[in-house]
Image: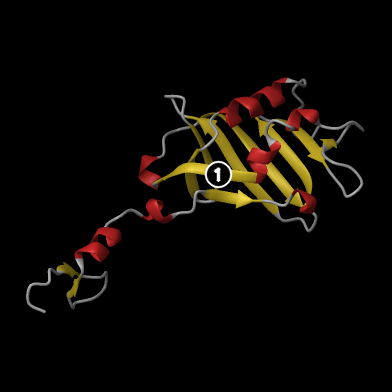
Amino acid sequence: PEGTELVPLLRDGEDIVAGVDPTLASVVDRPLTDFLDRELWTLSNARLRGLTIEKDGAERSFQRSDEYDWRPVDANVPARELDVVLDHLLFFKAKAHLAEEDRPELTGVVTVTFVEGDGKRHVTRIGATADGEVQADVGVLRAVLKRKELHADLLEIMARKPDRPKGG
């Protein structure tokens, strides 16, 4: 209609130009990372049976069952060291997502793996950038973490016990 502002839009693979409302055009021009959920995952503690935290070939492994909560696999005591990180790992949230071309190298990478009772695995790599920002890889996604202290807390858990070579 006359007086209505339209913005031309050409979709990939098409030859016909469409006219769209400028509001829609502003949404279409936003990067995909703007539409991603800030929730990276939410895990049910009751369904989980294993947790491994690994850094530089050393690992700490924990188990849980319906009879007891988290404990080290080699000890029959509660894993109180997980208290500071567990909720933040179960309800894993991002502050922002990063496009593939905006992903810096991570240092001090800690890999966290949860295993459900049916064997399904949930894996993330958490590390720091050169400027100290804490980021995580979950599948193909890279996110800036909402809780920056999570990385330091995981490093502290790894430092509490002598390094154990992987598989030994």
Which quadrant of the figure contains the C terminus? top right
Instruction: Please tell me whether residue 28 is drawn above or below residue 147 in the rendered image.
Output: below
* Extreme residue toward the front, this view: 3
Q: Amino acid at mark 1?
A: Lys
- Residue drawn where x is 70% and y is 20% of the image: 159
Measured from the top left, where is residue 122 in percent x and y?
66, 49
Q: Position of residue 25 (x, y in %)?
A: 23, 63
In this image, 134 relative to 24: left or right? right
Which of these two is toward me, 15 or 38?
38
Work out which quarter of the rendered image holds the N terminus and state it: bottom left
User: What residue does disc 1 label?
Assistant: 93
Left or right: where does residue 48 sit relative to residue 40? Answer: right
| Disc 1, SS | strand
105 or 22, which is in the foreground?
Answer: 22
Return the residue found at the far left: 2
Question: Along the horizontal axis of the image, is 165 left or right of 154?
Answer: right
